[in-house]
Image: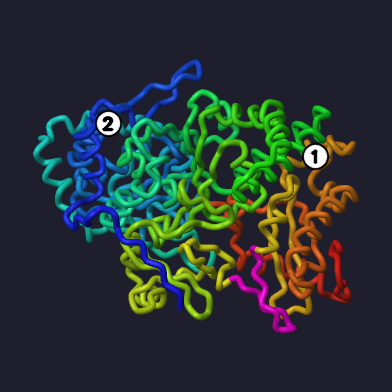
Amino acid sequence: MKTYDVPALVPADPDANATDLLVDRVRDTPDLPIFALPAPGGTWTDVTAAEFHRQVVALAKGLVASGVQPGDKIGLMCKTRYEWTLIDFATWFAGALLVPVYETSAPSQLLWYLSDSGATSMITETPDHFARFDEIRADLPLVSRVWQIDLGDLDKLVAKGVDVPDEEIERRRQIATGSDVATLIYTSGTTGRPKGCILTHSNFVELCRNAQKAVPEVVHPGSTTLLFITTAHIFARYISLLCVHGGVKVGHQPDTKQLLPSLATFKPTFLLAVPRVFEKVYNSSQQKAEAGGKGKIFRAAADVAVEHSKALDAGSVPLGLKVKFALFDRLVYSKIRAAMGGNVQYAVSGSAPLGLRLGHFYRSLGITILEGYGLTETTAPVSINRVDGFKIGKVGPPLPGVSVRITDEGEIQAKGVNIFAGYWKNDEATTSVFDDGWFRTGDIGEIDEDGYLQITGRKKEIIVTAGGKNVAPAALEDPIRANPIISQVIVVGEQKPFIAALITLDEEMLPVWLKNNDEDGSQPVAAAAKNPKVLAEIQRAVDAANANVSRAESIRKFTVLEHDLTEASGYLTPKLSIKRDLIVKDYTPVIEEMYAGHPATEGTSLVG
């Protein structure tokens, strides 16, 4: 068993709670902008730490005046926006805590989150959110207060709380100590019914204080970021708090169709995203170049970028490569940087592997993507790459205050300031995920001599073929998914004679690719799924992935589905991870068809 410990850099404060992150920021830099709100004409209006604190206290007073009691749980269904974090802190200042609900959640999911947690209040954002809540409201007798952001209810709360004294808010905000519950976040439910993860105030406080020390080049007063992934997920929620602690100015843009215009005006210095976003930026740039007759230049530029990054790792960039790099920097790289706002130096990527090629490509653009690793149960990060010790393809060493070990079976286990307090009202599930105080992540990985973690698979997702071969799906799925026309890949083959895959098409990129390949860009997805050129392109992606694994692990057949798998259809989690068990169950007839009467090929894949 291999263990790697990183001592905490900040002394623990068991009496501190999450409100102290804001109080300390106001004390240190009251006039520092820590948020920015979109304004007319593509401009942004700054909100200082002192002003944010004033708004938090005012809203907290409204919650108190409305009857919210210390320890109460408040459901929040809202997309990523300034008000999300405002409500988060106001709830803590009132002595209560949030139960986040994904804005895409169905009424049945909403019912489970609110009933299981014992929530007594609910905040929705839009009429659609309220309608979903209203469907199950009769089954939630404990929920006595409901507010809707788009109806101006936050302003009404502020008006209602004007007579609540400051002293009462100060008393309430100090009730919680580090060991108290700060929030209940329900797992995305890739397997079974979602469980409520108990995250404590110390989880947030100690992790924020230590993580900032680990990446001071990224998180510091004066740096900026534009959040666009859902704040209901622990990844963005934690980063929001880290930014308050670190003095980072945060903007919000939940509409991904408006992301590029917002990046151009906000000009962030770092981004938080999942690998799919970086793949989309790359693929869109490539297809745009193809459409403009400059595809050959883009491909050459991409190859040079990767070669240049690898040369940096080797310690020396040859003169000829420097010349090529300078040329393509002017022709290609600078345009991609400009599209992302022009100031992005760093990005934090999580939830899935980025891929070596993309890591090298963006690094040569001047954007260092720091891959990290974590789960809801670990308050997001367990580890993250360091700016001064950057290893592409790995997710960095543990954060300060966190320890990681690899069991003899290869499972990653973690212990430290970030580990949750257990599952809400579920002692059996809690006991099952701890091994002598170490949290069992369920993921498979390795630690190198420098303590850098590499994720190689997920324990529960390992496929065992009829021949007894263990196959990690991610090793095949991730490189195939990087192809511009491919959206999702689900590798199958449990107790089957060979490995196969279900594949869906990217409905956004497909029309552009078809047009660039002299095909009808308006053809429906169902027709494209049978198009010989599309199938040949998928075959190339599959063959490239197969080249990196043994013959027994390679994909021998694949079927292209006539529609994509989405969060709305229930097959993806909010962070866009596939719900493998559900997909395999619902698509059993399609999967069985690939194995029925079709002999396994030896070297290449065939359409099922």
Q: Is residue 414 magenta?
A: no
Q: Position of residue 529 (x, y in %)?
A: 82, 51
- Residue density around tag 1, few if under 14, some if 14–19, many if 20 or more, within 10 Å: many
* Circle 1: element type: helix
| Quarter assignment of residue 434 | bottom left
Residue farthest along the top direction in this orientation = 41
Q: Nearer the viewer, residue 567 or 283?
A: 283
Residue lying at the far bottom in this picture: please name it.
467
Name the residue at 60% across, 59% down: 578
Q: Quadrant of residue 400?
A: bottom left
**Residue 513, disc:** 1
Where is residue 520 shown, x and y percent of the image? Answer: 87, 37
Q: Give the percent coordinates (x, y) of residue 95.
A: 20, 48
Say which element carries label 2.
helix
Depth order, front residue of 437/386 = 386
Let me know if residue 113 appears in the view.
Answer: no
100 vs 539, left or right, is left
Which amino acid type corresponds to the residue marked 2 in the rendered image?
Ala
Q: From the viewer's perspective, is residue 111 above or below residue 302?
A: below
Residue holding disc 2: 49
